[in-house]
Amino acid sequence: MKLLFATNNAHKLAEVQAVLGPEYELVTPRDCGVTEEIPETQPTLEGNALQKARYLRERTGLDCFADDTGLEVAALDGAPGVRSARYATDGHDFAANNRLLLANLRGAADRRARFRTVVALLRSGEEHLFEGIVEGRIIECERGCEGFGYDPLFVPDGFDRTFAEMSADEKNAVSHRARAVRRLADYLHGLEK
Ligand code: ITT
C-alpha cells in the first residue's frame, strides 16, 4: 500500500519505512511535486503534525500522514519542545541546537528528558492522532554519529548508549517515533480486518 508521508527529513523517512516494513511504500512530498517547505507554525506538536498533514492533503488531494517531534527536558520546563528544530537558530542546525542544550543544562543535576512524537493521519476525510514517548536523559557531551538531531545527547532509560551509538534497528525498538508509527500501523491493519 502506498502512503504519503509529509516529511523532508531523510532520516525520519528511513526510520518510518523500517518500522512499517515492505508492505507499505512511503511516498514523499517531493514525489508528488511539493518541493516547498511545509509550514509548521503551531504552538503544539499535535497542531504542527495536523498542519503538515492538512497542508499536504490540500496540495495533493491525497490521504497522508505527518509527524512532529519534540525533545522535552524536565529542568528546562519542557523546552525545547515544539521548538526543537529551531532551538538555537531559525534553521535545522543540529550542532548549534546541541551546543545550546548543553549550555542551558550546564551544572544541572536533573538531566531527565523525553522525546515525544505525534503522528497525524488524514484518511477518508477523518483525522487521527497517535503518540509515542521515550524517557531518558541528556548526557554531558555528544557521543556517536548515527541518527540525527539530539540523538548524540540522548540516552534512553535502560541503556547506557545514546541513540547516535545505536543501529537503526536498536533505535527503532524503543524510540518515540517508532512507538507512534507502530500505533499508526496497528490502526491501518485494523481497517483491513
Ligand atoms: P520534517 O518537519 O520535515 O518532518 P523536522 O526535522 O523538522 O522534519 P520535526 O519537526 O519532527 O522534524 O523535529 C523537530 C526537531 O526535533 C528535529 O529537527 C530534530 O532536531 C529533533 N528530532 C526529531 N526527531 C528526532 C530524533 O528521532 N532524534 C533526535 N532528534 C530528533
Image (cartoon, rainbow, N blue to C red):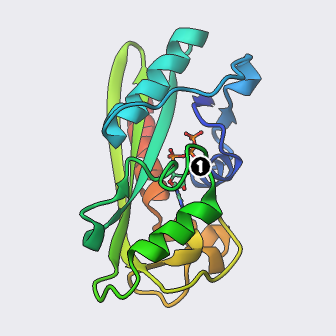
Q: Which residue is rendered at x = 60% and y = 30% of the image? A: 3
Q: Which residue is rendered at x = 35% and y = 42% of the image? A: 45
Residue 99 visible from this viewpoint: yes
Q: Which residue is rendered at x = 61% and y = 49% of the image? A: 92
Residue 108 location in percent, x, y? Answer: 32, 85
Frontmost residue, 129 versus 54: 54
- Asked where in the image residue 192 lies, by quadrant, the reply is top left
Q: Is residue 39 left or right of residue 147?
A: left
Frontmost residue, 153 versus 120: 153
Classify mark 1: helix, strand or loop: helix
Residue 53 location in percent, x, y? Answer: 47, 25
Q: Establish if 156 lies above or below 95.
A: below
Q: Establish if 144 lies above or below 173.
A: below
- The total of numbered circles placed on residues is 1
- Asked where in the image residue 27 lies, by quadrant, the reply is top right
Residue 170 location in percent, x, y? Answer: 59, 74
Classed neighbour count for the residue bearing mark 1: other residues with Cα under 10 Å, few (<14), some (14–19), many (≥20): some
On the image, numbered disc 1 is attached to which residue? 16
Q: Identity of the amino acid at label 1? A: Val
Quarter of the figure that contains the N terminus: top right
Quarter of the figure that contains the C terminus: top left
